[in-house]
Image (cartoon, rainbow, N blue to C red):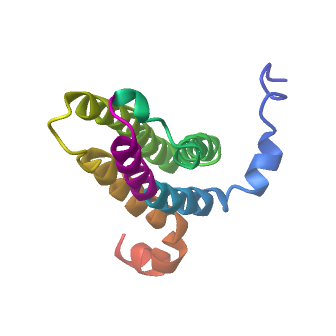
């Protein structure tokens, strides 16, 4: 008996293991949409108020980011190799979002610049999107892949 076997119900997790990469893919797409909306929200906050106190985190974007991280860690338990790659990419998105928000606050504090687009987070999201799509739809290219490899 493993000491942590009751902490994570592995049998129940394996039952939904095939859906996890699709769920991460959906959350990555939602995260990219909420990133655009959050950027517009930040611009509106800066126009209405002055200074960096006006800019706040947007809850839907934060929830999609945390959901991506949680689901990628669950996928790491089910599929260690693919889950590790996906988790690294999703954590990169999380870190880029975290520092991107802080840079928006610095830009708002400087008052001489307009808010720039969150380009690093978008780039990290594109890589996460590509790999999540690869993990989700591998069954479509599996016959071709197996014939080559």
- Measured from the top left, where is residue 29 in percent x and y? 49, 62
- Image quadrant where residue 96 sits: top left
Residue drawn at x 40%, y 74% as measured from the top left: 145
In the image, 32 versus 146, the foreground residue is: 32
Dominant secondary-structure state across the stretch colored magenta: helix
Q: Is residue 5 toward the left or the right of residue 117 in the image?
A: right
Residue drawn at x 34%, y 58% as measured from the top left: 126
Q: Which residues are magenta?
A: 35-51
Q: Is residue 29 above or below residue 72?
A: below
Q: Which quadrant holds the C terminus?
A: bottom left
- Measured from the top left, where is residue 68 in percent x and y? 55, 47
- Measured from the top left, where is residue 127 in percent x and y? 34, 55
Asked whether 40 falls inside the magenta stretch, the response is yes
- Measured from the top left, where is residue 148 in percent x and y? 35, 75
In the image, 121 versus 69, the foreground residue is: 121
| Count of numbered circles in the view | 0
Residue drawn at x 80%, y 28% as measured from the top left: 7
Asked whether 14 falls inside the magenta stretch, the response is no
Q: Is residue 18 above or below residue 95?
A: below
Q: Is residue 136 toward the left or the right of residue 92 in the image?
A: right
Q: Residue furthest top?
A: 3
Q: Is residue 147 toward the left or the right of residue 81 in the image?
A: left
Q: Residue furthest left?
A: 112
In the image, 90 versus 111, the foreground residue is: 111
Q: Is residue 76 toward the left or the right of residue 120 in the image?
A: right
Q: Which quadrant holds the N terminus?
A: top right
- Image quadrant where residue 136 sits: bottom right
């Amino acid at each position: 008996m493993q000491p942590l076997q009751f902490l994570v119900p592995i049998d129940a997790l394996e039952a939904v293991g095939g859906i996890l990469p699709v769920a991460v893919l959906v959350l990555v797409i939602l995260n990219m949409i909420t990133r655009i909306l959050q950027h517009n929200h930040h611009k509106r906050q800066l126009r209405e108020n002055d200074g960096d106190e006006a800019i706040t985190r947007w809850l839907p974007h934060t929830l999609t980011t945390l959901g991506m991280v949680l689901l990628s860690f669950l996928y790491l338990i089910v599929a260690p190799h693919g889950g590790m790659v996906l988790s690294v990419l999703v954590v990169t998105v999380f870190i880029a979002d975290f520092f991107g928000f802080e840079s928006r606050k610095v830009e708002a504090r400087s008052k001489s610049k307009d808010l720039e687009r969150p380009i690093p987070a978008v780039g990290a999201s594109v890589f996460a999107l590509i790999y999540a799509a690869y993990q989700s739809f591998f069954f479509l290219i599996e016959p071709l892949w197996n014939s080559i490899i």
